[in-house]
Image: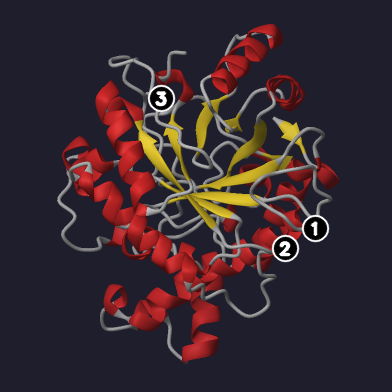
Amino acid sequence: MRVAAGGIAAVTLPPTTSGCGDSRPSESQADQDPPGPFSPPGFLRWTWVHGGGDRTPLEWKDQYGRLAEAGFHGVLVGGGETAVHAEAARAAGIEFHRWVWTLNRSGDEWVRNNHPEWFTVSRNRQSSLTHPPYVGYYKWLCPTRPEVREYLRDSMVGVAREPGVDGVHLDYVRHCDVILPRGLWSKYGLIQDKEHPEFDFCYCDTCRETFASIHHTDPLELPDPPADERWRKFRWDSVTELVNTLADAVHGVPAGSSVLRSGAGKPITAAVFPTPTIARALVRQAWDEWPVDAVFPMLYHNFYEESLEWIGRAVREGIASLKSPAVQPGATPTPQPRQLFAGLYLPALSASERVEAAEIAHDAGAQGVSFFEMGSIEI
């Protein structure tokens, strides 16, 4: 574990896990062909990278060099030694962004031991620390708490200040999935045609008291909490206000050079659910309102039981939403239009489908693609 400014732990991605809705289920070893040559001028290619493991620094340099030769612009790296990855990326001439788990802090031992009250509480009044939903690593901090925002702000600044880091890439910057993508229901033996209380967050004392101070009612006393638009918006806004804080802080760190940001300060990006509509409904995430420099929507079509054409529809919705930003008051706007890179899930795509999916994303207006994950690419 690396330590950020002020002694605060900057938790990055642990080894590959068998996950749910977001994001990172374990990769299949099948279909390990290259993702294809589709890379027109200006259409950038990224990949998420699990940066731990037993590769030597020389092997990382070789790997990143081969990525650069294959037309990749940058890597989003979780885990491993920052200095090793920074040097390897610099030698290859590609960007190195730190991929960081944000509100899911299952690997944050300091918080678990010192502030168990910071973790989210479900509608049935159980803490995600002691009763994690779906899987054991689903332990979430509450974005409404000022002390959580301060802690995460300092943590992300510490990450951004590390030598060689070109930007900060947020993951799990949302609430727990109140409803999983339909393609995952059978995996967990669930039918989620409504919002079940054990997956509905957050009803901690801070959320309840803050909401009551605005709307003069306790959300637990609402006739139907899942249907109340005020309560829905409160949780969307809570996550967005956290992102505003993190974006301002990271943008304040003196920049290196990144294609994602023309102004002063390092860029901040986020892995998000496929579209603003889906993100709001499934994970309380209103990413079209965020002052980040780029979003990487996870367009894992098989999770949603959709065809490849769905990728294009999702990109178009995302692009349209980013052209008309609704950034909340107090946030510092980005100095250029926010970009969108379509996240593609390689184990669900044949070699030819990888090329087709990238073409679909390009034609729909995406500025590039990002492949999950480097381990499924052979170059």
Seen in the picture, residue 329 relative to 347 is either above or below; the reply is: below
The vertical placement of 156 against 286, above or below, is above
Query: Is 276 drawn above or below residue 49 in the view shown?
Result: below
Q: Nearer the viewer, mark 1 or mark 3?
A: 3
Q: Residues within 10 Å of mark 2 (few under 14, many from 20)?
A: many
Q: Quadrant of the N terminus?
A: top right
Decide which of 116, 288 is in the foreground and name it: 288
> Circle 1 is placed at which residue position?
252
Q: What label does residue 237 carry, if any?
A: none
Identify the residue at horizontal 80%, vertical 42% (top origin): 256
- Mark 2 vs 1: CB contact within 8 A: yes
Residue 248 is marked as 2
Quick check: 133 left or right of 54?
left
Would residue 1 be seen by someone viewing this image from the given angle?
yes
Which amino acid type is marked by label 2? Answer: Asp
Mark 2–mark 1 Cα distance, whole angstroms, equals: 6 Å
Element under disc 2: helix
SS class, disc 1: loop
First in sequence: mark 2 vs mark 3: 3
x then y, percent, for residue 113:
65, 43
- How far is disc 1 from disc 3 in space, using C-alphas? 37 Å
Q: Are marks 2 and 3 in contact (CB under 8 Å)?
A: no
Left or right of 60, for residue 29: left
Viewer-side label of 2, 3? 3
